[in-house]
Amino acid sequence: MTRFVIEVARPDDWSISTLILHLIQQTSIKTIERDIKLLLEGLVQKSGHWDQNVLNQCNGLNIEKVKQYQSAIRNWAYRINGKLFG
């Protein structure tokens, strides 16, 4: 199963949820690129927050938010690994 991870850093060290995009139907790479572009533009428009309206527009994708916690990088890696392969 194909998945994409969108991890964004903010200059103010505010933590933002990582998005894991799961393909739920055959989708062209052009459509996936368009959806990722919309997500990132929405993030900018919402001052560093994911725009739920944009998230809802991404047809063909199941979008999972993974909240970040102030923990060791290794713990974060294990969490993401579990979401992707677990």
Image (tube, grey):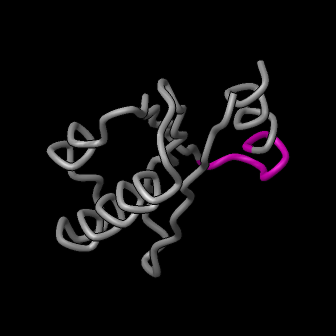
Q: Which residues are magenta?
A: 70-76
Q: Position of residue 51 (x, y in %)?
A: 21, 52
Left or right: where 22 falls relative to 40: right
Q: Nearer the viewer, residue 64 or 35?
A: 35
Query: Which quarter of the figure has residue 2?
Result: top right
Q: Position of residue 49 (x, y in %)?
A: 28, 58
Q: Nearer the viewer, residue 14 or 46?
A: 46
Q: Nearer the viewer, residue 83 or 37?
A: 37
Residue 71 sits inside the magenta stretch: yes
For residue 74, above or below residue 34: above
Identify which residue is drawn at 37% across, 66% down: 37
* Quarter occupied by the C terminus: top right
Q: Position of residue 62 (x, y in %)?
A: 43, 28
* Quarter occupied by the N terminus: top right
For residue 11, above or below residue 68: below
Residue 21 sits inside the magenta stretch: no
